Amino acid sequence: MFKFKKIKKILFFILLFILSVNSVPDKSEVHQIKQIRNRIIKQARTFLGRRRGRLRVRKRSFRFDCSGLVMACYYSAGIKLARAIKPDTRSASITTALYDSFQHKKWRSFDKRKPRPGDLVFFANTYDRNRNRKWDDGITHVALVEKVTAADTVYIIHRTSRGVVRDVMNFKYKNKYKHNGSKINDYLRKRSPHSGKPGSAFFAVNLLAGFVDVLTE
């Protein structure tokens, strides 16, 4: 009986050891993913200020729009986002197709897990795509997360009507343009007599559809 209890105790500690080993992430893999994120953001920063022309990365060119920008930046890190688009989600909008293709991923809201550099961030109703003057355009825009501050401000890089720019979203003050003298929210949709929504909804943070980490989840 004593030997049985001793063996049982030994087996218990062996099981704990196995579980602890399996739960520890591979440091080399974590480092590799971090390097990929850095390459994506480094490339995105090189495009800041661009207002026209196709985006070129390693002898390949991409469309000068929001989806072309994220594809170009991922391509610089050796990732072809176009391959992630499922045949049954192909549509006139590459942005919508990307969003639909990543539905199997774990989508995150800001309060559950802060986004990381290189994450994709999708927005809805950023313009009246179908020109019916209604708030029913679905996913219309995609951007890259550049960084997140301790004050819950998310910096994004994306292609807009102003070219490739850096904008901010704050999750503590979603309806304020400035706080303590500093800009904390950028507008993503222009005011229009036919927008059908209050001005505060034009902030990027209020048009957010979700973040997705395509590298690890």
Image (cartoon, rainbow, N blue to C red):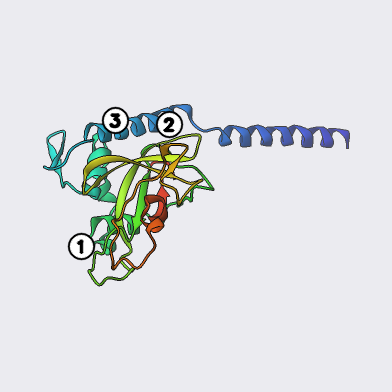
Where residue 129 appears, as percent x and y from the top left, is 24, 64
Q: Earlier in the sequence, mark 2 or mark 1?
A: 2
Q: Picture coordinates of residue 217 (x, y %)?
A: 44, 45
Q: Residue 29: which numbered mark, if any?
A: 2
The residue nearer to you, when weighing 38 against 49, is 49
Q: Quick one: label 3 or label 2, which is nearer the N terminus?
A: 2
The type of residue carrying mark 3 is Lys
Distance of mark 3 from mark 2, alpha carbons? 20 Å
Q: Are marks 3 and 2 in contact (CB under 8 Å)?
A: no
- From mark 1 to mark 3, how far is it between C-alphas? 29 Å
Quadrant the N terminus occupies: top right
Disc 2 from disc 1: Cα separation: 36 Å
Residue furthest to the front in view is 181
For label 1, the residue is 92
Work out whether 81 lies above or below 181.
Answer: below
Q: Which residue is mark 3?
A: 42
- Look at 50% across and 37% down and name the residue there: 151
Secondary element under disc 3, as helix, strand or loop, is helix
Q: Residue at x 84, y 33 (%)?
A: 3
- Of discs 3 and 2, which sits in the foreground? 3
